[in-house]
C-alpha cells in the first residue's frame, strides 16, 4: 500500500493519477473534503474512465498534525509520498508554516520510522536549496544553505522540513528528496503557485521582472518521483528543473499560449523596494494580507540558475521543453474556461 499526503494538491492529484494508472494500491490523505473534487477534475483531463480510476483511491481524512488520523493512514503502508505542505510567502504566516511544514513533516518521519516504511519520497522545493554567490555558477544539490541569508518564511520551513527528513534517514528510513522549481500543471487555477499566476497573466499583468527561476512541468515531477521510488537510489536529493527562464520570458510565453497581451512594464528594483514597503504598511494599517514581502520582492528580481544534471544522469531522464509544457498547460486552462 502506498500513502500519498497532500493528495488534493497539484503534485498530489497528478501523482495519484500516475500511481493509479499503474494499478498501484493507493491511500491518500485529505484535509478538506471539497478539494477532492479537484482531484476528480484532474483525472478527467487524461481518461474517459476517470470515475473508475478515481474510485480506486482510498481516502483518509486528517492533517499532518493529527497523529491519530495519521496512525490510521499508515496501516499496512509500505511506501510514502509526502507532498503535503503549506505554501505562503507572507511573513505573518510563519508559525502556521512551521506547524505544517516542519512539525507535520516530523510526524510523517516519526511514523515512517515506527511503521518501518520501506521508502519515503519527500517533495521539497528549490527554495530549500542554497544559492550561489556568482551568477555564472549553477545551483546544484550540493550548494550550501546560508543560514545568515534573508530567506523567505516558506524557504526556511521547507529547509527545516528537509532536516527532519534527513533525521529519518539516520533512523533507517530510505528516502529520496525532490526539489522542484516552479511547477506548471493544470487544475489548480486559484490555489496559488503557477496556476494562479497563469490566471493573472490571462486577466492581464502590468509588470514583469528580469529575475530568473527554474521551471518544470507536473508530469516530469511525478514521473521523476515514481522512478526514484522504484529505483535502488536512496538518501539523495534531486533538483527537478527543466529550464531556467526569466520571469519576463515566462510571462511572455504564457501570454502567447493564452492569446493575451504580455506585461509591458518592468518592475525595477526601485519599484519593488517601494512596493513591499507599501504592502507592509497596508497590512499594518488596514489588516490586508501580504502580497509582496521584502523576501519575495528580492526573489522575483534575483537570477538563479539550477543544474538538473544529477537526476538526468541517475535516471537517464529527459525533461520536456518548457515551451511544450506551457502550451499544454495553457490548453487545459482555456478548456476549463469553456
Image (cartoon, rainbow, N blue to C red):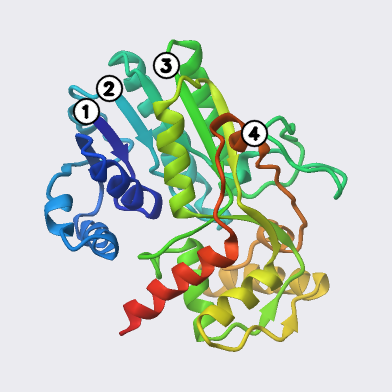
Left or right: 159 as drawn, with respect to 81 = right
Quadrant of residue 250 in the image? bottom right
- The CA distance from mark 2 to mark 4 is 27 Å
- The mark that comes first in sequence, 3 or 1, is 1
Quadrant of residue 149 in the image? top right
Mark 1 in CB contact with mark 2 (< 8 angstroms)? yes
Q: Which residue is mark 3?
A: 173
- The CA distance from mark 4 to mark 1 is 29 Å
Foreground pick, 22 / 86: 22
In the image, is residue 313 above or below residue 194? Answer: above
Query: Which one is closest to the eye, mark 4 or mark 3?
Result: 4
Residue 6 placed where, x, y %? 33, 45
- The CA distance from mark 4 to mark 3 is 22 Å
Q: Which mark is residue 78?
A: 2
Q: Which residue is mark 4?
A: 310
Instruction: Find numbered disc 1 in the image and state the secondary structure of the residue it sits on.
Output: loop
- The mark that comes first in sequence, 4 or 3, is 3
Amino acid at each position: 500500500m502506498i500513502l500519498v499526503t497532500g493528495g488534493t494538491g497539484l503534485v498530489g492529484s497528478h501523482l495519484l493519477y500516475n500511481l493509479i494508472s499503474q494499478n498501484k494500491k493507493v491511500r491518500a490523505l485529505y484535509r478538506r473534503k471539497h478539494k477532492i473534487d479537484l482531484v476528480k477534475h484532474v483525472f478527467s483531463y487524461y481518461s474517459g474512465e476517470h470515475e473508475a480510476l478515481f474510485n480506486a483511491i482510498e481516502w483518509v481524512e486528517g492533517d499532518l498534525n493529527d497523529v491519530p488520523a495519521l496512525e490510521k493512514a499508515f496501516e499496512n503502508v509500505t511506501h510514502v509520498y509526502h507532498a503535503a505542505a503549506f505554501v505562503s510567502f507572507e511573513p505573518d504566516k510563519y508559525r502556521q508554516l512551521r506547524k505544517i511544514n516542519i512539525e507535520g513533516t516530523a510526524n510523517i518521519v516519526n511514523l515512517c520510522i515506527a511503521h518501518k516504511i520501506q521508502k519515503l519520497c519527500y517533495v521539497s522545493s528549490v527554495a530549500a536549496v542554497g544559492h550561489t554567490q556568482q551568477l555564472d555558477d549553477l545551483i546544484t544539490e550540493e550548494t550550501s544553505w546560508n543560514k545568515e541569508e534573508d530567506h523567505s518564511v516558506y524557504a526556511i520551513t521547507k529547509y527545516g522540513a528537509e532536516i527532519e527528513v534527513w533525521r529519518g534517514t539516520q533512523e533507517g528510513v530510505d528516502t529520496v528528496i525532490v526539489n522542484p522549481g516552479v511547477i506548471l500543471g493544470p487544475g489548480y487555477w486559484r490555489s496559488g503557485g503557477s496556476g494562479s499566476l497563469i490566471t493573472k497573466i490571462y486577466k492581464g499583468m502590468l509588470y514583469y521582472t528580469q529575475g530568473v527561476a527554474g521551471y518544470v512541468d507536473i508530469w516530469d515531477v511525478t514521473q521523476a518521483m515514481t522512478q526514484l521510488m522504484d529505483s535502488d537510489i536512496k538518501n539523495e536529493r534531486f533538483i527537478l528543473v527543466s529550464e531556467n527562464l526569466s520571469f519576463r520570458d515566462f510571462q511572455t510565453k504564457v501570454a502567447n499560449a493564452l492569446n493575451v497581451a504580455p506585461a509591458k512594464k518592468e518592475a525595477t528594483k526601485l519599484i519593488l523596494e517601494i512596493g513591499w514597503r507599501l504592502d507592509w504598511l497596508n497590512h499594518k494599517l488596514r489588516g490586508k494580507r501580504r502580497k509582496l514581502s521584502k523576501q519575495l520582492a528580492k526573489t522575483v528580481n534575483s537570477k538563479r540558475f539550477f543544474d538538473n544534471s544529477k537526476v538526468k544522469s541517475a535516471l537517464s531522464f529527459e525533461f520536456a521543453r518548457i515551451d511544450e509544457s506551457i502550451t499544454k498547460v495553457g490548453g487545459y486552462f482555456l478548456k476549463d474556461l469553456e
